[in-house]
Amino acid sequence: MPSPVLLRPLPRLLRPLRSSSGCSASAAQRLSHSVREHSRSLLQKYRSQEQYFKRKLKAAYGRFPEVSDHA
């Protein structure tokens, strides 16, 4: 585990790297926004699939099957 004294100058060292990498602030914002949108759409898809399978199980069993410890 490095000491906190060594970790302190790291942000100062990383600042020039970030500015010279060619990734502007607006591009980074756009990227984070698109990642957020993508994860939101994936979550919506997962939730709709979950609802679909719960409906199918209910239709097949008449109720949602219980989870037993002796499976």
Image: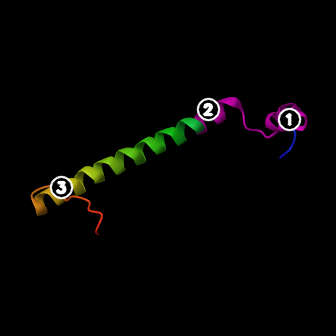
Give the CA separation, mark 2 to mark 3.
43 Å
Count of marks placed on residues: 3
Q: Earlier in the sequence, mark 3 or mark 1?
A: 1
Q: Is residue 19 magenta?
A: yes
| Residue 24 position by quadrant | top right
Residue 33 at what x, y percent from top left? 54, 35
User: Would residue 42 be found to the left or right of residue 33 on screen?
Assistant: left
Tell me the crowding category of disc 2: few under 14, some 14 to 19, or many 20 or more residues within 10 angstroms, Cα based: few
Element on which disc 1 rests? helix
Residue 3 at what x, y percent from top left? 87, 39
User: Would residue 20 be found to the left or right of residue 28 on screen?
Assistant: right
Of tags 2 and 1, which is closer to the observer?
A: 1
Element on which disc 3 rests? loop
Element on which disc 2 rests? helix
| Residue type (three-letter) at the residue carrying disc 2 | Gln
Residue at mark 3: 64
Of tags 2 and 3, which is closer to the observer?
A: 3
Give the CA separation, mark 2 to mark 1.
30 Å
Residue 26 at what x, y percent from top left? 65, 30
Q: Which mark is residue 4?
A: 1
In magenta, the rendered stretch is 5-31
Residue 48 at what x, y percent from top left? 29, 48
| Residue type (three-letter) at the residue carrying disc 3 | Phe
Q: Which mark is residue 24?
A: none
The structure residue drawn at horizontal position 54% and vertical position 42%, both measured from the top left corner, is 35
Residue at mark 2: 29
